[in-house]
Amino acid sequence: MNTEITTTEETFQPDYAGLQSYLDYVQKRRSIRKLTSGPVPDETIRGIVEAGRWSPSSANSQPTRIVIVKERHKELWDFIESTLKQNLQGEQLQRALNRLPGYRSGVFTLVFYEDSAVADNPPFPGGQERWKNFSAQALGIAQANVWNAIAAAGLAASNQHINLQIEEELRDFLGVPATWRSYSIFPVGYADETPEEGSRHPHEEVIFYEQGPAA
Ligand SMILES: Cc1cc2nc3c(=O)[nH]c(=O)nc-3n(C[C@H](O)[C@H](O)[C@H](O)COP(=O)(O)O)c2cc1C
């Protein structure tokens, strides 16, 4: 009997419970746009954003920056409302305004930034565009990790892009360097709505085993 192989097989077992628990959180994460308030300790928020800080990035370049707004959460949404009123008009303004109460009634807001000093400066000559794309991928992974962590903590959020309509004003309000580019805003709180059942394309349309569909 080859005990070495037996030992190896016993040692390298997938952790099914760990995988299932992770998948549960991935599926629990939804876009929740109507939030309500409740107690959220600062340590919980710190834990959530740690999921962003520990996210992977190209050559460990770490282009992601996150601003947490808790004390000024309501002030931030009042500021966003008045700035949107200055910058937008008509139906576009109305659509944006309709959703704001659901965000303002949450607990805190996370604003994601990309540090262009990192994203625009590859550590090797050339490859500027590829490096920027890698930075965008890193930001996406950081946002996904934070969003999943929010779900794991029993909280809810959505991924908003109002920041793109108020970039300069938001920069001043938050006091971030001119070199940071805003990515998105996550209003976070307790869920005050039950989303429709989640849907995705069928497994076979998205996942391919060994060969793609053109083979
Ligand atoms: C890159 C990206 C941009 C998004 N932008 C917005 C947005 O601006 N506003 C919004 O309400 N939802 C936004 N969403 C949320 C998507 O609409 C949502 O994730 C998708 O419909 C799946 O629903 P679920 O998040 O509930 O699973 C965005 C999601 C991603 C990943």
Image (spheres, grey):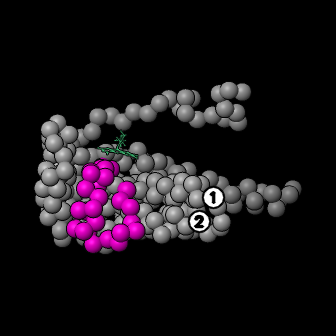
Q: Is residue 87 above or below residue 179?
A: above
Residue that carries the numbered disc 2 in the rendered image: 122
At a point 27% along the width and 39% down the height, the residue shown is 195
**Residue 41 image-quadrant placement:** bottom left
Element type where label 2 sits in the image: loop
One can see residue 140 in this view:
yes
Amino acid residing under circle 1: Gly
Q: Which residues are magenta?
A: 158-183
Element type where label 1 sits in the image: loop
Bin the neighbour count of mark 1 within 10 Å (Cα to Cα): few under 14, some 14-19, many 20 and up: few
Quadrant of the rendering where the C terminus is positioned: top right
Residue closest to the eye, 150 or 136:
136
Image coordinates for residue 65, horizontal then vertical, percent? 40, 67
Amino acid residing under circle 2: Pro
Image coordinates for residue 29, horizontal then vertical, percent? 36, 48
Bin the neighbour count of mark 2 within 10 Å (Cα to Cα): few under 14, some 14-19, many 20 and up: many
Residue closest to the eye, 89 or 189:
89
Is residue 62 rendered to the left or right of residue 215?
left
Ligand 1, seen in the image, is in the quarter at top left
Residue that carries the numbered disc 1 in the rendered image: 127
At a point 82% along the width and 60% down the height, the residue shown is 3
At a point 42% along the width and 63% down the height, the residue shown is 114
Is residue 113 rendered to the left or right of residue 33?
right
Is residue 193 rendered to the left or right of residue 82?
right
> Is residue 70 within the magenta segment?
no
Residue closest to the eye, 207 or 136:
136
Callout 1: CB less than 8 Å from ligand 1: no
At a point 31% along the width and 61% down the height, the residue shown is 111
Is there CB contact under 8 Å for labels 2 and 1?
yes
Q: Residue furthest right?
A: 1
Quadrant of the rendering where the N terminus is positioned: bottom right
